[in-house]
Amino acid sequence: MKIGTPLTEISKKALLCGSGELGKEVTLELQRYGIEVIAIDRYENAPAMQVAHRHYVISMLDGAKLREIIEKEKPDFIIPEVEAIATPTLVELEKEGYNVIPTAKAAFLTMNREGIRRLAAEELGLPTSFYRFADNYEEFKAAVKEVGIPCVIKPIMSSSGHGQSVIKTEADIDNSWHIAQEGGRAGAGRVIVERFVDFDYEITLLTVRHCMGTTTLEPIGHHQVDGDYRESWQPQPMSETAIAKAKDIAVKITDALGGYGIFGVEMFIKGDNVIFSEVSPRPHDTGMVTMISQDLSEFALHARAVLGLPIPEIRFFGPSASKAIVIEGNTNRVEIGNLEKVLEEPGVQIRIFGKPEVRGHRRYGVILATDETIEKAKEKAQRAYDKLKIDILPEVTR
């Protein structure tokens, strides 16, 4: 691997498709190796744009615009950081010689829940919840009847819980359909109806494929609200049988997707039984805890793997927790204060993402904490969170 000087004709270029908080951390890690980073997203001043060498604002579902930028920049690495991308264009570009991370196939299959669910359940035979897909309201009602109540409804393409709901009684059916239609990343359309899984807890098993093989990290437990991550901790206690099954599932699904990079493999755990849920071929929001729990965060691991560099060891420091800072309001001016109190305890860190506005609710930062046990780390993160002072200021025109 040779890396030339950024902003010269010999630089190595990475083009980031998606510029949120996860993309920002990936950008910083790539730049530590001297990589020239170009950020793309659908809105101006996205977090990764604030640290990238340059950026573009486009709809990444616009394949023609995406191709135009890629042909202009000629990046060495195309790194999808969100689901909502014109993946058929990425497939074409890969065939033309461009390097899509981890692969165009992975981006295509995981862009929507149908591709990855059919791969996992129907091709690989991995244990999953019972499911059906529906394109319209009549098919949706029939799917709910077949799957049974309670069931979980999700658009086939969404993230951070957008468009997700649970049908607990027949009275919820209409509302769940409307939530799914309004919350999909690509607008209204196809949904997945999943049988509600009885589980003790759910995990993310971060799995990194790199030039030395495949490495699974310590399992991450997490708590969600309406499908949106609120807190995570590492390591999640598991039986030896369950962790062995989880690792086997993670290796099988990531081997099928191929390429180098980090994957967030989500699974439900019930005793010693493990059920596959989803996989993201990129850093995972619950994995932000690794910014304090390990010597190499999920973002550092992603950068190394993408660049084809070895990962001989990952040092885990001990029990750690993260707590998302979620802000509600409707403004382009938010102040996060009282930081001197937030950071007064040892073993506490904070990341403020620098998002330009909030419409409804949005994740604006994360508290990180480490301690002797998981419970103590979670309690420390909560104490730090409780000291935050959030000011929602009146919006101004810029």
Image (tube, grey):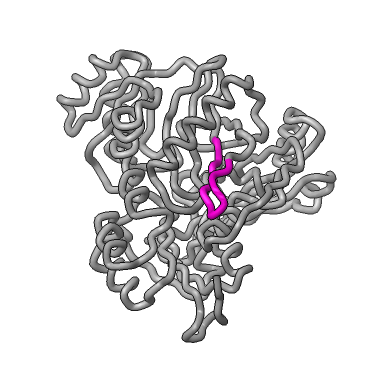
Q: How many numbered circles does the render carry?
A: 0
Q: Nearer the viewer, residue 54 or 341?
A: 54
As for residue 53 lying within the magenta part, the answer is no
Q: Is residue 185 above or below residue 16?
A: above
Expressed as whole percent of the image width and height from the top left, the position of residue 384 reads 74, 42
Direction from residue 245 to residue 279 in the image, left or right: left
Chief SS of the magenta region? strand
Which quadrant of the figure has residue 34? bottom right
Residue sitting at x 66%, y 52% = 312
Expressed as whole percent of the image width and height from the top left, the position of residue 143 reads 23, 21
Residue 97 at least partly seen: yes
Expressed as whole percent of the image width and height from the top left, the position of residue 141 reads 21, 21
Residue sitting at x 36%, y 36% = 163
Q: Is residue 129 above or below residue 154?
A: above
Which quadrant of the figure has residue 231? top right
Q: Which residues are magenta?
A: 205-215
Q: Is residue 369 above or below residue 8?
A: above
